[in-house]
Amino acid sequence: MPGTLFTDLSFCSMLPDHGPYGLVRHGAIAADGGRIAWVGPEDELPTDYVGWRRAPQGGRLVTPGLIDCHTHVVFGGNRAREFEMRLEGASYEEIARVGGGIVSTVTATRAASEDTLLADALRRADALIAEGVTTLEVKSGYGLDMDTELRMLRVAHRIAEARPVTVKTTFLGAHAVPAEYGGRADAYLDEVCIPALRAAHAEGLVDAVDGFCEGIAFSPAQIARVFDAAAELGLPVKLHAEQLSDLGGAKLAAEHGAISADHLEYLGPDGIAAMAASGTVAVLLPGAFYTLRETQLPPVQALRDAGVPIALATDCNPGSSPLTSILLTMNMGATLFRLTPEEALAGVTRNAARALGLTDRGVIAPGMRADLAVWDVALPAELTYRIGFNPLHARIFGGEA
Ligand code: DI6
Ligand code: FE
């Protein structure tokens, strides 16, 4: 049976060197077997596709399905009380040091059943899906023990069974030192984190390995040990780096061939040069910048000048970024970080795919997955411009509406 021919549309291919947004007016997209078979101006459609089932899109704008490449959507409880404490004057780091912060979410996550974690995560995933997200990265890191880290990753996989979305799982055992290992970070890595990584990998639950390199979390030397364990398993690495201070995390990650380094407000010239040399994607997380009322901006112009690809993600998590809107993330990327609307869209499509090591999505081109978002907008900049408005008309996942 032939596939589907999407017609009467404009599309942003997001291919580099194809003009702004790779925009094509009066286009058509042929999808077959979940992949894009042909794409181009409708009046250049080869005769082979003429008999295919047509799905006219009413002149709407089509983009690649959006990709949220950095989330922590699986967790127990919430941190509304901590939000209040910050409004009363406490800093994020002070709260973490008195047993709040990440560690308090660990307590709630350990106490939650797999089904409860899934039900809560689906509400967040659904909000993202409703805005055209077709690929979602999900991290562990609120278990910090063998059972709960594995449970979080199983829940992440169940999101993809329950919804039409691809989930990529990232092991983040090196997110925080749990209370029972207070002051013994290295012992935690040896006795829990690295064994849990090996067990999760053996169960097929890990696509990449992440860590939090920060004064309140793990040192570069400790992160390097986690990266070595990842390398032994043949897994790609990424890192939460330079979020609150400059410990040289991005440089370390780049030297380990990291697919991304994330946050990066305090990134310096050495880190940028190392990322450029290794092709590491800079994942900027404006929701955390906003929530923590950070004032140090990530070095966007220096990243551009060095040719480092820039992605944007929600960082959806209960503490520093309780954000479940990829469109608001794009708007914040523009308004707070001065990304252009085209960079914002590339940040949640082409470059987000690259931050996950995915070469089969993020642009509209033959051979790519037929993951598309159809929007009720005339201009691509409208996707970034509005605040709290969702112009999604339809979402196509693997060629299916
Ligand atoms: N940096 C972040 O912004 C999140 N994790 C991380 O390493 C925050 C996680 C939390 O506060 O629960
Ligand atoms: Fe994060």
Image (cartoon, grey):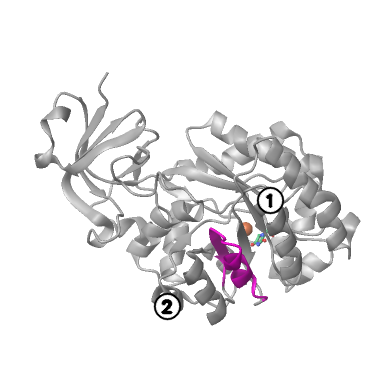
- The quarter of the picture where the N terminus appears is top left
Q: Which percent across, then down, holds residue 256?
A: 61, 63
117 relative to 14, above or below? above
The answer to whether 215 appears left or right of 169 in the picture is right
Disc 1 and disc 2 in contact, CB within 8 angstroms? no
191 relative to 256, above or below? above
Residue 374 included in the magenta stretch of the image:
no
Q: Secondary structure at mark 2?
A: helix
Q: Quadrant of residue 290?
A: bottom right
The answer to whether 401 appears left or right of 289 in the picture is left
Residue that extends furthest to the bottom in the rendered view of this protein = 269
The answer to whether 16 appears left or right of 327 in the picture is left
Nearest the eye: 320 or 370: 370
Residue that extends furthest to the top in the rendered view of this protein = 1
The label shown at residue 301 is 2
Instruction: Give the amino acid type for the residue marked by disc 1 in the picture.
Output: Glu
